[in-house]
Image (cartoon, helix red, strand yellow):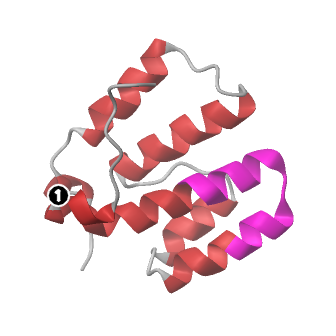
Amino acid sequence: MSGFRTHDESDAPEAARPMLEAAKQVVLITAGVANGCEYCVAAHSTLALRARVPAEVVEALRADRPLADQALEAVRRLTHAMVVRRGWVDEAEIEAFLAARRTPVSSRRAGP
């Protein structure tokens, strides 16, 4: 995959940085749930809570329920599709993910 620049937290837009750790934990917990890995779900739930991911988000992920946060829900849906379909997601799922990520951060993030 040439032509794609590698990014990390240091070059992410300042407004997006609070979402990065939460999004990582959403991916990891969702994959653990989809794979039925109780250890993974427990470990990443603990890490998510330590990273200040709201408890209601962690509980929803563990129960395989939709998230209220539109951007994190988009991450959850795409991750779930990637895991259960072994990477074969359709264009509509990718477009839905990208559309959710384009919403302004201020409208996606609730709370302090």
Q: What residue appears at the point 68 percent right and 49 percent down from the top-left corner?
A: 31
* Residue 18 higher or lower than 104, as above or below: below
In the image as oriented, which residue stretches furthest toward the front? 2
Q: Considering the whole magenta stretch, tell me its main secondary structure.
A: helix
Q: Which residues are magenta?
A: 27-43
- Badge 1 crowding class, 10 Å Cα cut-off, few under 14, some 14 to 19, many 20 or more, is few
Tell me how many marks there are. 1
* Residue 102 higher or lower than 52, as above or below: above
Q: Decide whether residue 31 is among the magenta residues.
A: yes
Which residue lies under the disc numbered 1?
Answer: 13
Instruction: Answer with left or right where residue 57 lies relative to residue 3.
Output: right
Q: What residue appears at the point 64 percent right and 59 percent down from the top-left corner?
A: 29
Location of the C terminus by quadrant is bottom left
Classify mark 1: helix, strand or loop. loop
Instruction: Answer with left or right where residue 58 lies relative to residue 15.
Output: right
Q: What residue appears at the point 63 percent right and 39 percent down from the top-left corner?
A: 80
Q: Amino acid at mark 1?
A: Pro
In the image as oriented, which residue stretches furthest toward the top? 91
- Foreground residue among 100 and 27: 27
Q: Position of residue 75 (x, y in %)?
A: 47, 45
Q: Position of residue 62 (x, y in %)?
A: 68, 62
Q: Decide whether residue 99 is among the magenta residues.
A: no
Q: Position of residue 4 (x, y in %)?
A: 34, 32
